[in-house]
Amino acid sequence: MEPYMPKNLLVWLALCLSLSSLAIAGPLEDGRAAAGRGDFTAAHEAWRPLAEAGDVNAQYNLATLYVRGLGVPEDTVEAMKWYRRAAEQGSADAQTKVGAMFGTGLGTGQDHHQAVEWFQRAANQGHAAAQLMLARQYFTGDGVLRDFILANMWANLAAGPTSQTWIIPVSLEEARNLRDTIIRFMTPEQLAEAQRRASEWSPKPER
């Protein structure tokens, strides 16, 4: 399983560095401005103290610099550390990144059980990419008991209008293809149950 890393780096950075829906004056915005003009060293200098002080947006953005080697030497272990700190504060984007890194072993030992746990937390919040990743885990049985009902339910949600794509884009076509593939392994009763669960599901943001 590959972590979600869009090939177009400029688009990916623009998405990653606009995590907050509210513009926050001060070092966080200074870092974003620096990143926008390609000065990632200055962005790192602006975000590092904020990240160390516990700012979730700065932690996520700092991890992004380390995972891509922008303004700092590429260091996936350091990236994992900061993604995880943001994830522990409830960031669904960071939780999805942590899950993907555990799934591949990038910056940490490979651990599918941990991957499932982090995907689950983000998926519960309505994160479409995490929902798709979780659907794959249930379909393949990596890190969790194979369960076609849950796999189909999560793939349905990833492909549905209630999903929140947030920072990491999810391909609706990919989610729909996975959902349709899973259906081929299901009984009509299982499919009906999966659809019922998907229709009754609602996001539960972490506090």
Image: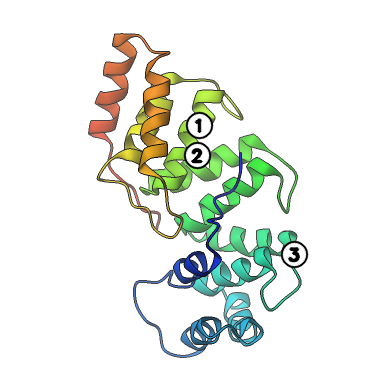
Kind of residue indicated by mark 2: Met
Farthest residue to the front: give it: 8
Q: Which residue is mark 2?
A: 133
Answer few, some or many: residues within 10 Å of disc 1's Cα (few below 14, many 20 plus, some between 14 and 19): many
Answer few, some or many: residues within 10 Å of disc 3's Cα (few below 14, many 20 plus, some between 14 and 19): some
Q: Which residue is mark 1?
A: 136
Picture coordinates of residue 203 (x, y %)? Answer: 31, 46
The N terminus lies in quadrant: top right
Callout 2 secondary element = helix
Q: Find residue 104 and report its image quarter.
A: top right
Confirm or deny contact between disc 2 and disc 1 (CB under 8 A): yes
Kind of residue indicated by mark 3: Asp
Callout 1 secondary element = helix
Task: Look at 40% across and 49% down and name the residue there.
Answer: 127
Callout 3 secondary element = loop
Q: Find residue 72 and report its image quarter.
A: bottom right
Picture coordinates of residue 85 (x, y %)? Answer: 59, 62
Q: Which residue is mark 3?
A: 75
Q: Please state if 95 lies on the left or on the right of 84 as rendered.
A: left
Task: Look at 61% across and 58% down and name the residue there.
Answer: 84
